[in-house]
Image (spheres, grey):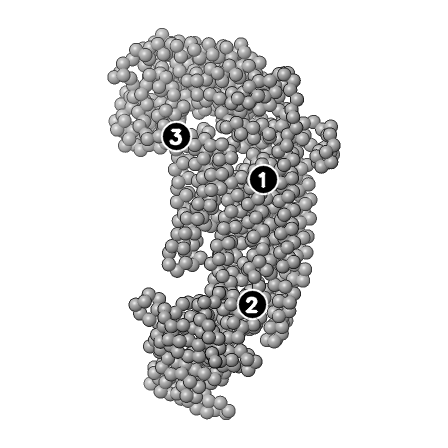
Amino acid sequence: MFKSKIRDKIASHEMSITVLMIIPLILLFFFSFLIGRYPVSPNEVIMAIASKLFLINSTLSPAVNTIIFDIRLPRILAAMMVGASLSVAGASFQGLFQNPLVSPDKLGVSAGAGFGAALAILFSASVFMIQFSAFVWGLIAVGLTYFLGRAFKGTSMLTLVLCGIAIASLFGALLSLIKYVADPYGQLQTIVFWLMGSLASVNNLDIIIMGIPITIGTIILLMIRWRINVLSMGEEEAQTLGVNTKRLQAIIIVCCTIVTASAVSICGIIGWIGLVIPHVARMIVGPDHKILLPASIILGAFFLLLIDNVARTITTTEIPLGILTAIIGAPFFLYLLMKSKEVWS
Amino acid sequence: MKNQKSIIIIAIVIIAIIALIGAYMAYQGPTSSSGNQITDMIGRNVEMPAEVNKVYSLSSSTTVLLYMLAPDKMVGWDAQRSEEENIYMPDKYQDLQVYGGGKRNANYESIISSNPDIILIGHGGTIEDVNKIQKKFGQIPALDVEGDNNLTDILPAIDFMGTVLKEPEKAQELKDFYNKALNQVNAKVANIPESEKKKVYYAKDPDGLKTFAPGSAHTQLINICGGNNVVEAPVTKGGMGVSMELVLQWNPDVIITSDKQFYNSVYSNPQWQTINAVKNKEVYLVPQSPYSWFEGPPGANTIIGIPWTAKVLYPDQFKDIDLKGLTKEFYSKFYHYNLTDEQVTGILSSSGLKEF
Amino acid sequence: MSHLMEMVNGTFSYNSLDNIFEDINFEVEKGDVFCILGANGAGKTTLIKCLNGLMKLSSGKVLLNGKNIYGLNHSQIARNIGYIPQIHNSTFSFTVLDVVLMGRAPHLDIFSSPSKKDVKIAENSLKALNIYYMRDKPYTEISGGEQQLVFIARILTQEPDILLLDEPTSHLDFGNQIRTLNIIEKLAKNGLCVVMSSHFPDHAFISSNKVAIMKGKNFIDIGTPEEVITEENMEKAYGIRVKIADIDYRRACIPLKIK
C-alpha cells in the first residue's frame, strides 16, 4: 500500500521526487564536514571553505585545513561518488538481467579487482599500481566472462551469468592463493583490509582520476536509461520493439563494468550497496528506470556517505565499510521490505 | 532530447567542478624553510619541528623501535595488543589508545587530534605512497623508516630513529646490545661445519603446517644462528602452507613455533611422533611478551631472539651465553620492565629451554 | 506489385539435420487476418518468430513490401511488424502506461526517452481499447485478460502494419478469448494485417479470412476458413473427429467425443 500510494503521487511529477531527494543529500554533504574524530567547529568549517573559495588568507591552524581539505573533503566526495556508481550500476544490471537479485559484480568485476589488488600488494607495488591493477583486472574478468558467454551457442543472459559465476570463482581462488602466500604481518593484513573496503586513504587525485570514467559511464547509462526499461521486458520482446539488444547489452555491461571497477579500485570491495540501493530506490520511485537510475544515484551517494561518516567517527580506528554497509544496511532493508509487501512479482 | 541535453550539461558541470577542486587541491604553495630539515630514509626532505615530544608510528616494526627508544613520546598504538602481549609491559603504555596502522585501519583524524609532532611510517613503499600519507597529515612531518623490519640490516633504522626521536644515547645502547648479541653468535656459527648444522622448521598456526618461504625476513634468525631452514619452496618470500608429508620428509632436528596450541599438542599428536625434533624433545615456543622474540613483526624485537635461538639450536656450543642476564638487560633497557629472577626463569623455561 | 508480407520457400531447422518446417509459401495483405492452426509442436511459434527476424530461416526468405527482412535493422522491422509473445515473464512492476510507452521504442533513437507526443500516442492506444483507467496501475497486478489488452495497446502504440500474435487467446478465459478476437477483427478492419497462431479452429471462423494448417513440416492446406477447416483436415491435423456446422449466422467447428 505504501508503495502504490507513493507511486500514485509521483506518477505526475516523476522528476521532482528525484530533485526532492537531493535536498537531504546536500544537507548530509555539509553536515559531513562537521563530524570527525578531530574537533572542528562549524565556524571553522565555514571559514576554511570561504577562505578557499574567495582566496582569503585563512587564520585557521594548518591542522584544521588539513582535516577539512585533505581528510574530509576527499572522503566525502569519494563516498558519494562510489555509492552513486555502485548503485547506478546495480540498477542497470538488474534491468539488464531482468533480475532484482543481481549486483554489479555479477560478471566478476569485484573478484577480478580483488585479485588485481592482491597481486599488486603481493609484489609490494605502489598505491597507484594497486588501484590500477584492481581496475584492469576487474575489466579483464568481465571481458573473459563476456567473451566466454559469447563463445557458447545460444548466447542468453543466463549463459553470461553462469560464465560470470565461473570466472568470479576462478578469480576468487586465485585471490585465496595470493592470500595464502602473502606475508601475514604486512601484505595479508593489507589485502584483507582492502577487500573489506575503506575510503580512509582516498586523496583528491584519486577522485579526479576515477571521477572521469565514473562520470562518463554514468552519463551513458543515464542517456540509455529508458531503453533499459524495454530491455527488462526480456531480450526477445525488446528485440521485437526495435531494440538492438546485443548492442544495448554490450553498452550496459561496458559502462557498468567501468563504473564499478573505478569505484572498487579506489575504495576496495564494498558489497551490498549495488544490490540493495536499487531496491530501496524502486520502493520509493517505482521500477521505471527513467526515474530509478537518478534516484539510485542520489540514494547510493547518500547511503555510502552516511556509512562512511560512521566508519570514520565511531571509534579511534577505521571500521571497514564492507562490514558497516551490511550491519547498518541489512536491518534497514528488512524494515523497508516489511513496510512494502510486494515490490516486484 | 531536451532531457538528454540537460543531463550532459549537468555532467559537464560535475566534471568541471571535480577538476577545479582537484586542480586547486593539487596546487601547493611554496613551503617556507626554517633550515631544520632532515632527509628521511626514502630520501624525502622533511621539515622537523624544534621539539619532538609526541610521536605516532603507523607500522608495527617502527612502533617497536619507538617503544624501545622513547616510550613516553608515544601517543597511541597502531594495532590492538593482546592480554598475553601486555604481561611484561608497564600499565601506562598498555593504556594508550589504538589509532590504527597504515595501509590498514589508521584513522587520520584520531591521530591528528592526539597532536603528534611527527609521524613514523615503516617501509612505506614508494616515494609517491609516502607523499600520499604525508598529505593526510598536512604540516605534521611524516618520516619514512626503511630496514626497520630486517634484522640483518637494522642499524641504519635504529640510528635514524635515534636522531628523529632525539634519543641518540638510547639508540647507541640498542646498537651495542645488537652487536654484542650478534658477535657472540657469529663467531661460533662460522665454525659449525655444514654437516653438523641443525635442520630447523618454523611452525605457525595450531596445526603447525603454516611456515615461511626460505629467505623470508620472518625466519632470518634460523640462518643467523647457524641453522638450516628445512623448507624448500619455489618462492623466496611470503608465508606458505605445507603438508604433513613434506614435514615428515624434511624431518627437522628442531622445531620452533609461535603457536601455544601447537606447542602443547605436538608431543601427543601421533602424526608428529616420528619427527626427530619431537622424538628428541626439541620443540621450542617463542616468548611473546611484550613482543615476539622470533618474528611477528620481524625487526628490533627479535634482537633478544638471537641469543635465544642460538641456545635453542646449539645449547652446548653456546653455554657461555648468559641468556638470563641478557634477557633482564634487554627488558629493563628497552622494554622498560624490570624482570624478577623468577619471571626470567619463567619466560625461558616455558619456551622449552632446558638450560640457560 | 509486391505483397505486404510474403514468405517464399521458408525452411527452418535448428541443427540442419531435421527441418522444423520446409518450403512454406504464403502471402498476406492489408486487412488480412491469417490464422495458423496446428497441433502442439507443429512449429507454429517458430514460423511466427521467423516472420520478424527473431529466428532466421535456414533457407528461403521473408519479404516485407518486397524487401527481404534480413536486410533491415531491428527498428525498421519493429516499425512495420509488431509482436506479442505467447508467454511474458514479468520482473518489474511497471505501470500500464510505461509498458504501453515501450511501443515507441522503434521510433526513438537509443539516447532518447518518450516525449509528450509519444505519451499522447500511448494514451490514445489505451483509450482505443477502453483501458485508459488502468494507466497508472502496475501491469503485474492486473488480470491476464487485461494484460493481453495492455500488450495489444503497446503494439498499437508501435504503429506497425502487421501484427504477429502467438496464440493470443491461449491464457484467457472464455469471454476474454472472444473479446480479444473481436478486437483483432476490428484492427484488421482498420487496415492492419494480423498473423496469428491458434489452437482453436473455431476461432478462425470468428475472426480470420485466411487459414493454414501446419502438419508434418508443411501447410497441408491454406485458404479461406470455409475451405480449410473441414472435417477431414481436422482429423488429419489433430487426429480427432469434429463436426462443422452452421449455427446462427456463422460456421462453427465442434469437437466430437473420442470413441
For residue C52, above or below residue A121: below
Q: Quadrant of the C terminus of chain C?
A: bottom left
**Mark 1 — residue?**
A207
Residue B71 pos. (x, y %): 55, 17
Q: Chain of mark 1?
A: A
**Mark 2 — residue?**
C103
Residue at 44 percent across and 68 percent down: it is: C70
Same-chain check, marks 1 and 3: no
- Nearest the eye: B355 or A318: A318
Residue A295 pos. (x, y %): 61, 53
**Mark 3 — residue?**
B239
Q: Chain of mark 2?
A: C
Looking at the rendered image, the disc whose residue lies closer to the viewer, 2 or 3, is: 2
Residue at 26 percent across and 28 percent down: it is: B249
Helix, strand or loop at label 2? It is helix
Distance from Cα at disc 1 to Cα at disc 3:
34 Å
Q: Dot 2: few (<14), some (14–19), or many (≥20) neighbours within 10 Å? A: many
For residue B333, above or below residue A54: above
Verify CB contact (< 8 Å) between mark 1 and mark 2: no
